[in-house]
Amino acid sequence: MTSSKPGRILHCNRWTALLAAGLLCATAVLAKPGKKTTPPPVVADVPVLSLEGGRQLAYERMFSTEREVKLKRGFWTRVLDIVAGAPDYHQMIRPYSVVADSHGRIIVTDPGIAGIHVFDFEKQKYKFLTRENGKDELKSPQCVAVDAQDNIYVTDSETGRILVWDANLKYRRALGSLKGGEGYFKRPTGIAVDSSAQRIYVSDTTRHKVFVLDMNGNVVQTIGRNGAAIGEFNFPTELRLHGNELMVVDAMNFRVQVFDRSGQFLYGIGKIGEISGTMYRPKGVAVDSEGDIYVVDGIFDTVQAFSRKGELLYYFGKTGNGPAEFQLPTGLFIDRSDRIYVVDSFNHRVEVFKYSAVSKQGSGGGH
């Protein structure tokens, strides 16, 4: 392995060889506070890669269907399967976005099937959420977020609305005007919820701005306009709230811009390019427990980790359909227990990685 900073920046030629051997590199993770998730069983024997300072990244598993959650099947259920045939299970078709709530449930939007998969590995339960032929029909779910009460918010890019389910997975309401005006969304994509301030942030990709809503869906502020200057957007997509920072994937400006919660620009990372450390199709964004910023790139089929100064720290992934490989990855989420969830869209699955940060005992502090 060659690197300009030992254990951190991996160069393309050697990185490809390492990934082919099943080796990975990454850093620590953080998401909204909540209950630690229960890891699904490991299904791939991928070696753990040790990084500098005692850090490690391990590949845990992939999952794609309802069957992988419902592991407990009694004797008579198995007999019925033999007599009547095994039941049909929901499976991911074209998954896009992922989040985990405080109960450890993993929620995945799927515009390919116009629905939302809810996986609960701890309780071995699965639920498929959708809305058909009603006033608030779900047609093309895009991004998903949860609030402090585990209510689920999903943007629908086709209907221009935000649909909300409660923590018991019961549908509650829709946000977004149907009659035009400032509250009318043309193509809502990214979403983030600030429960403490009672605000919802929504990116409208084709209007090139971020809307700030109250909890009733009223517009209280907008951020940005079309352009390439600082604070301007060219097709903004995914959002992430972290501390006082709002991160916006500015897709066709090939960067991530970071604002405070009032909409003031703080800093940005990324630029267009075809080598490591640049961006070509930035998708999901997340932040780890050491404060580094992860960005999925759908063309590179990688996840890259940057410092807040924009320095590439490491990246993992390559094109393929095996463990730790991706084909058009999209969504990204990092939970409180340091698990990294990557939506591997064209492989119809979510892949899970476990990052181990610097230990508190060894570092005299840690996170």
Image (cartoon, helix red, strand yellow):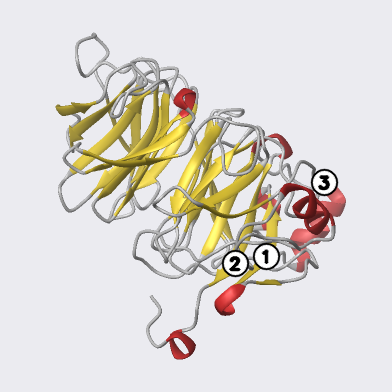
358 vs 239, left or right, is right
Q: Residue at x 45, y 70 (%)?
A: 36
- Residue position marked by numbered label 2 in the rendering: 354
Callout 2: 10 Å neighbours few (<14), some, many (20+)? many
For image coordinates 39% across by 19% down, the residue present is 187
Residue 52: x, y in percent? 59, 74
Front-lying residue, 65 or 6: 6
Q: Amino acid at mark 1?
A: Glu
Residue 120 image offset from top left, x and y in percent: 54, 59
Of the two numbered discs 3 and 1 on the same chain, state the one appearing first in sequence: 1
The residue indicated by pointer 3 is 84
Label 1 Cα neighbours within 10 Å, binned few <14 / some 14-19 / many ≥20 = many
The mark nearer the N terminus, 1 or 2, is 1
Residue 112's image quarter?
top right
The residue at 45%/34% (across/down) is 255
Instruction: State the CA–CA distance, disc 2 to disc 3.
Output: 40 Å
Q: Circle 1 is placed at which residue position? A: 60
Observer-nearest residue: 101 or 322?
322
Q: Circle 3 — which element?
A: helix
Residue type, numbered disc 3 = Ala
Q: Residue furthest bottom?
A: 361
314 lies left or right of 62: left
Q: What is the x, y in percent for residue 234?
A: 40, 20
- Please determine whether, in this image, residue 225 is positioned above or below residue 59: above
**Residue located farthest toward the front when viewing the structure as drawn:** 4
As drawn, is 67 to the left or to the right of 313? right
